[in-house]
Amino acid sequence: MKNLVVVILIFFGVSSLNAQTEKEKSFEDTKAIIESGLFRFEAITALPTRGSSISLTTNTGHINVNGGRAEVFLPYFGEIRGMGGYGDNGSIEIKNKVVNYQVKYNDRKHRIVVTFNSRNKSERFDFTFTIGSSGKSSVIVKSINRTTINYYGTIYPLTDNEKTK
């Protein structure tokens, strides 16, 4: 009976170590993607300041960070103040350089926080990514002219086609 208990304890100990190792490897892979400065965030859900979450499965959004440049297309659901015009769809669209790019790692919690600013023709946006060990991420997007909105999705490395753009 004692042998059975010892075997069970060893089994669970090894299983737990293996799970921890996989989580650490996943975190290291995610860190490498962020450190490269070449990554893509694919949004699957938007959470406006007011209202419930909105699935983006049919209205996808993304943020590409490519060596100091950002290409952003995110559908926007919220209030826009003092801007816009005829034919403006209200989404967040940027093709410009990244400013104030910062990365903070929390190795103990397996979390990465990336912040930067970028702008389009008419407004500046502040982006804050909170990224977990598996690449799952939330992004807070702020602008003086819009209510804050959160997006949930996943971080991926850029493909070769996306790197050349």
Image (cartoon, grey):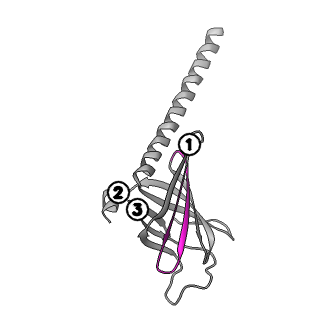
Q: Earlier in the sequence, mark 2 or mark 3?
A: 3
Residue extending farthest top = 2
| 129 is within the stretch colored magenta | yes
Q: Is residue 76 above or below residue 136?
A: below
Are discs 2 and 3 less than 8 Å apart at CB? no
Q: Nearer the viewer, mark 2 or mark 3?
A: 3
Q: CA distance from mark 1 to mark 3?
A: 24 Å
What secondary structure is the magenta-colored segment mainly?
Answer: strand
Q: Is residue 16 above or below residue 149?
A: above
Q: Nearer the viewer, residue 123 or 47?
A: 123
The spot of residue 53 in percent (x, y) is 63, 65
Q: Nearer the viewer, mark 2 or mark 1?
A: 1
Q: CA distance from mark 2 to mark 3?
A: 16 Å
Label 3: state its secondary structure. loop
Label 1: state its secondary structure. loop
Q: CA distance from mark 2 to mark 1?
A: 25 Å
Q: Which residue is mark 1?
A: 110
- Over which residues does the magenta segment extend? 114-134
Q: Nearer the viewer, residue 142 or 133?
A: 142
Q: Which residue is mark 3?
A: 68
Which residue is pictured at 51% across the width and 56% down the height?
102
Q: Is residue 2 left or right of residue 58?
A: right
Q: Earlier in the sequence, mark 2 or mark 1?
A: 1
Q: Which residue is mark 2?
A: 159
